[in-house]
Amino acid sequence: MRRGPLILKRMRWLSTNRSGTWQQGRRLLLGCGLVAALVAATACTKDAAVEASDSDANGYLCAKCGAKLYTDRSVFLALKCPKCGREGLLEVVGYFCAKDNHLTVVGRKAAPACEKCGATLSGMRLPREKDLKAWGATQVPK
Ligand SMILES: [Zn+2]
Ligand SMILES: [Zn+2]
């Protein structure tokens, strides 16, 4: 009976001590994770991600009259087409084909085919002003 409380005390000491180191370890792990995430994020945004998600223009295709249009990056068009006045505007995105270096510009849809070689494309990127011009789009006056 005399050893009971002593063991209990010892166990409590062990458990508090263990939770202390566990918390420290967790904090260290969290810190490492954060640093790794930061490094990964800055490394990624340097090239591919910026290239894919950053553009200097917004491209649109009218589903009603087929007008190809683009605006400044800061200008966003509503659904209404400035050419025909009907509500048929679709925002367009680009899909790059690695086989022939051709950027296919289409309304947002899954896995379109390359305009040149017909290959199924993945890896969406936003078309830039020069891509939209090459596609045949005209700029919408502000
Ligand atoms: Zn239209
Ligand atoms: Zn192709």
Image (cartoon, grey):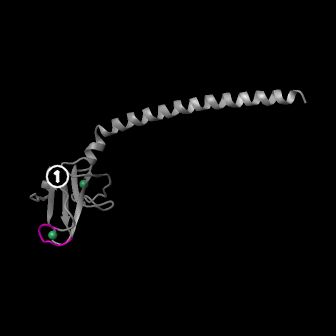
Q: Which residue is mark 1?
A: 131
**Residue 124 left/right relative to 87:** right
Q: Nearer the viewer, residue 104 or 14?
A: 14
Q: Nearer the viewer, residue 91 or 102?
A: 91
Query: What is the tally of numbered marks visible in this picture?
Result: 1
Q: Position of residue 133 (x, y in %)?
A: 12, 54
Whether 127 is drawn above or below 35: the answer is below
Q: Is residue 85 magenta?
A: yes
| Picture quadrant where residue 16 is located | top right
| Residue at (21% x, 64% y) in the render | 78
The C terminus sits in image quarter: bottom left
Q: Which residues are magenta?
A: 81-87
Q: Position of residue 27 (x, y in %)?
A: 53, 32
Whether 73 is drawn above or below 66: the answer is above
Q: Of helix, strand and loop, which one carries label 1? A: helix
Q: Is residue 48 magenta?
A: no
Q: Residue furthest right?
A: 1
| Picture quadrant where residue 110 is located | bottom left
Whether the residue under disc 1 has CB within 8 Å of ligand 2:
no
> What amino acid is at disc 1?
Asp
Whether 110 is drawn above or below 38: the answer is below
Q: Position of residue 98 (x, y in %)?
A: 27, 49
Q: Position of residue 53 (x, y in %)?
A: 27, 48
The N terminus sits in image quarter: top right
Whereabouts is ligand 2, in terms of quadrant? bottom left
Whether 25 is drawn above or below 127: the answer is above
